[in-house]
Image: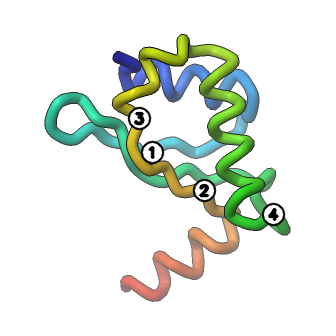
Amino acid sequence: MASIQQIVAALRAELPAINVDALGERQAGRVYGVVIDQAFAELDHPERQAIIWDALKKHIPIPELNLVGPISALSPEEAELRSADVA
């Protein structure tokens, strides 16, 4: 099972400036959340997910990725807009 620390390390190995503060664990250790990086600007959802999963697959054995849940990817601008909507 991939831990949140392993997931953070895998993502930072490929995207050093990525913000992973909004990742968390739910019951049974399932990791989920939102990551933010400028690399996601101008990309559509499938391209963003490909970046995330390619990074994870490079650094974490496939069987351990079974408990990785949904991870959304936003650009810093999108994250700022969403946080303004919530406030």
Distance Cα–Cα, label 1 vs label 3: 16 Å
Q: Nearer the viewer, mark 2 or mark 1?
A: 2
Q: Are marks 2 and 4 in contact (CB under 8 Å)?
A: yes
Checking the image for residue 68, the label placed there is: 3
Q: Which residue is mark 1?
A: 21
Specify which label sits upstream in the sequence, 4 or 1.
Answer: 1
Q: Secondary structure at mark 1?
A: strand
Residue at x 76% of width, y 66% of height: 44
Specify which label sits upstream in the sequence, 2 or 1.
Answer: 1
Q: Nearer the viewer, mark 1 or mark 3?
A: 3
Checking the image for residue 73, the label placed there is: 2
Residue at x 72% of width, y 44% of height: 50
Specify which label sits upstream in the sequence, 2 or 3.
Answer: 3
Residue 49 horizontal/vertical position (percent): 65, 50
Specify which label sits upstream in the sequence, 2 or 4.
Answer: 4
Distance Cα–Cα, label 2 vs label 3: 14 Å
Q: Which residue is mark 4?
A: 43
Residue 47 horizontal/vertical position (percent): 77, 54
Label 2 Cα neighbours within 10 Å, binned few <14 / some 14-19 / many ≥20:
many
Specify which label sits upstream in the sequence, 1 or 3.
Answer: 1
* Amino acid found under the numbered disc labelled 3: Val
